[in-house]
Image (cartoon, rainbow, N blue to C red):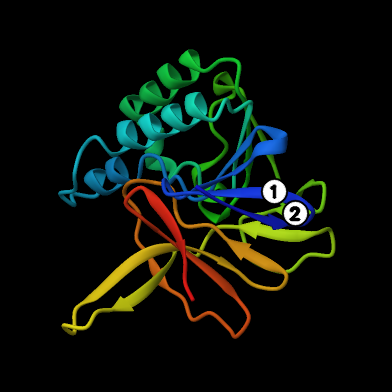
C-alpha cells in the first residue's frame, strides 16, 4: 500500500488495483466488468471460468482487511446485458448478502449504459458522474471537472517497462495528471491500454503485492 494526497484527501493505492480513502473508510474500484467472461461465452468465445468469483473474493478480502464501510464503483460494474445471467447475478447476490452492512455506490459508466443498472435487490445506489466527495470528483470518464480533482477509470491504464535483456513487461498502473487521475481496471478479466504520461504526471505500478512509483 502506498499513500498519496489528492483533492485534500489521503488516498492509499493498493496492489489489488483499487484505491482506499482511509479517512472516509471508502474503497474505490474502477472497471470491475463483472460478467465479462459469461458475456463472451454466450457469444461462443471460449474464455476462463471463475472470473466473477475471483473478483468478488478480492473485494471481500479488501473490505475485511481495511474495515471498509463504503465501496464506490467508478463505472462498468457489469460488463453487458448478458452479464445478467443467473449464475453471475447469483454469485453477486450471495456476496452482497454476506456484506449487507456495506454501502455500495455505482457511478455509471459506458458499459453500465448498455448493461443497465444492477438489480435493485443488490442495494447499490446508482448515480451519474460526478460523485463529489470533498475535493474529489468521482467519475468513470477521465475528463477534467470543475467540481474537484477527478478520479476515474475507463482506460484500463498500463505501462510498458523494458529490461536489460530486451524483455518487456506490461503492468497495470495508477496514472495521475494535474487534474485527472485514472485507476487501473479492477476486474480479473479485463484488458489493458498502454498510456503515455505527460511530463509532471505521476505513475504508480501495481505488481505482485506492492505498488511502486516510477521515477
Q: Let me know if residue 75 appears in the view.
A: no
Between 94 and 135, the one lying in front of the other is 135
- Vertical placement of residue 213 versus 161, above or below: above
Alpha-carbon span between mark 1 and mark 2: 14 Å
Q: Residue at x 36, y 23 (%)?
A: 91
Q: Residue 207 is drawn in which quadrant?
A: bottom left
Q: Position of residue 30 (x, y in %)?
A: 52, 50
- Residue at image x 67%, y 67%? 180
**Position of residue 12 measured from the top left corner of the image (x, y, whole percent):** 58, 48
Residue shown at the point (21%, 83%) measured from the top left? 164
Circle 2 SS class: strand
The answer to whether 171 appears left or right of 75 in the picture is left
| Residue 190 visible in this rendered orientation of the protein | yes
> For mark 1, what is the residue?
10
Instruction: Give SS at disc 1.
Output: strand
How many numbered badges does the structure rendering display?
A: 2
Depth order, front residue of 67/40: 67
Q: Is residue 116 left or right of residue 85?
A: right
Badge 1 or badge 2: first in the primary sequence: 1
CA neighbours of label 1 inside 10 A, class few (<14), some (14 to 19), many (20+): some
Q: Is residue 69 above or below residue 188?
A: above
- The x and y percentages for residue 111 are 50, 52
**Drawn side of residue 61 relative to residue 142, left or right:** left
User: Which callout, 1 or 2, points to the residue nearer the camera?
Assistant: 1
Q: Position of residue 134 (x, y in %)?
A: 82, 47
Position of 211 relative to 122 (above/below): below
Mark 1 vs 2: CB contact within 8 A: no
Question: Which residue occupies 41% across, 33% down?
Answer: 84
Q: In the figure, residue 5 lies in which quadrant?
A: bottom right
Check disc 2 and report the residue beneath it: 137
Amino acid at each position: 500500500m502506498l499513500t498519496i494526497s489528492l483533492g485534500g484527501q489521503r488516498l492509499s493505492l493498493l496492489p489489488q488495483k483499487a484505491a482506499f480513502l482511509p479517512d472516509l473508510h471508502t474503497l474505490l474500484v474502477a472497471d470491475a466488468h463483472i460478467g465479462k467472461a459469461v458475456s463472451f461465452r454466450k457469444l461462443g468465445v471460449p474464455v476462463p471460468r471463475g472470473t466473477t468469483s475471483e473478483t468478488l473474493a478480492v473485494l471481500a478480502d479488501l473490505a475485511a482487511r481495511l474495515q471498509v464501510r463504503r465501496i464506490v464503483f467508478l463505472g462498468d460494474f457489469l460488463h453487458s446485458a448478458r452479464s445478467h445471467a443467473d449464475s453471475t447475478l447469483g454469485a453477486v447476490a450471495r456476496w452482497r448478502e454476506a456484506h449487507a452492512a456495506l454501502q455500495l455506490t455505482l457511478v455509471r459508466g459506458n458499459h453500465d449504459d448498455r448493461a443497465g443498472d444492477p438489480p435493485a435487490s443488490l442495494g447499490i445506489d446508482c448515480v451519474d458522474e460526478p460523485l463529489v466527495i470533498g475535493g474529489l470528483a468521482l467519475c468513470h470518464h477521465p475528463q477534467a471537472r470543475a467540481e474537484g480533482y477527478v478520479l476515474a477509470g475507463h482506460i484500463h491504464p498500463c505501462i510498458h517497462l523494458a529490461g536489460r535483456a530486451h524483455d518487456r513487461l506490461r503492468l497495470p498502473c495508477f496514472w495521475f495528471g494535474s487534474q485527472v487521475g485514472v485507476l487501473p481496471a479492477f476486474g480479473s478479466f479485463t484488458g489493458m491500454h498502454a498510456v503515455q504520461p505527460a511530463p509532471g504526471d505521476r505513475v504508480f505500478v501495481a505488481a505482485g503485492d506492492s505498488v511502486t512509483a516510477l521515477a
